[in-house]
Image (cartoon, rainbow, N blue to C red):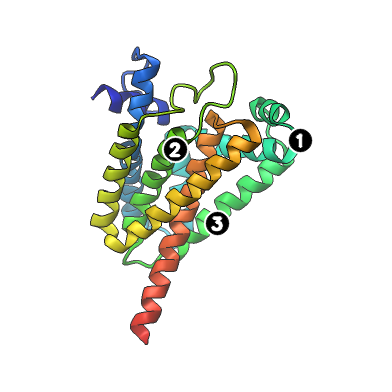
Amino acid sequence: MKGFILALQFLTVFPVKKGVDATPEELGRSMGWFPAIGAVQGLILVAAYFILSTLLPESIVAGLLLLILVLTNGGLHVDGFADTVDGLAGGKTAQERLRIMRDSRIGAVGVLFVFFLLLIKFLALQELPAEVKPQAVFLFPVLGRWAMVPLAYLAPYARATGGLGAAFSGNSKGVLLKATVSTALIMALLLGLLSLVILAALWIIIYMSAGYFKRKIGGATGDVFGFHSEIAEVLFLLSVLAMTNMLSADLEE
């Protein structure tokens, strides 16, 4: 249970036993609980969805769901996404990219990409068919938190000195297996076995992305973890939309 609490205090703003002492190894193993933290956030989003959708238009509900998700983690992953984009866009060497990513200021490129990130999420949530919307609303933070686990397994920590993601990089196969099996079970139960194709596709994308970041900056950082979390959420929502559209077209034929 300590791993769950550590993951909860790392990934959210919830005041649950803040300041729990932990070794780097314990922090690393807590990644096995990351999808469970996504499930906690997903439950909050689903509850908000059912309440708000009785009172407000779907477009407003979609925007409020994104706001609620950002509030539950203090914007940690969106900030990491922006910093990563800035670093990749502005740096010519690994050292320059890492220096830009560490800068607390967000550049114009980062702001632009965050705008499109949130816009695509908003449109995807709005367009989800009613029969899968509650499931997708619950699952997209689960997939976002899971995405950090295979990245940690595949990529070393990029900086010479410790940072926010140092304890997580280079995680064990057992941690990866725990997180992936739990995520796969939840997806299969809520969206059916076909949805596991989405999980497999995300794994391939993360595998390729880990290689890309190893070439660009030498591995992963806390910002890169946040980047992958946000990208996984967007890709999951778009994949569910594509899957439901294809199934609907087949039924019409």
Is 135 on the left-hand or right-hand side of 219? Answer: left
Question: In the rendered image, which quarter is residue 105 located in?
Answer: top right
- Residue annotated with mark 3: 120
**Secondary structure beneath label 3:** helix
Determine the image quadrant of residue 1. Answer: top left
Which is more N-terminal, label 3 or label 1? 1
Helix, strand or loop for disc 1: loop
Q: Alpha-carbon distance for marks 2 and 3?
A: 21 Å
Q: Give the label on residue 92, or none.
A: 1
Q: Nearer the viewer, residue 193 or 78?
A: 193
Residue corresponding to mark 2? 148
Vertical position of residue 84 compared to residue 186: above or below: above
The amino acid beneath tag 1 is Lys
Residue 58 on image: x %, y %: 44, 61
Horizontally, is 231 left or right of 14 in the view? right
Mark 2 touches mark 3? (CB < 8 Å)? no
Q: Is residue 74 visible?
A: yes
Query: Which dot marks residue 131?
Result: none
Q: Amino acid at mark 2?
A: Met
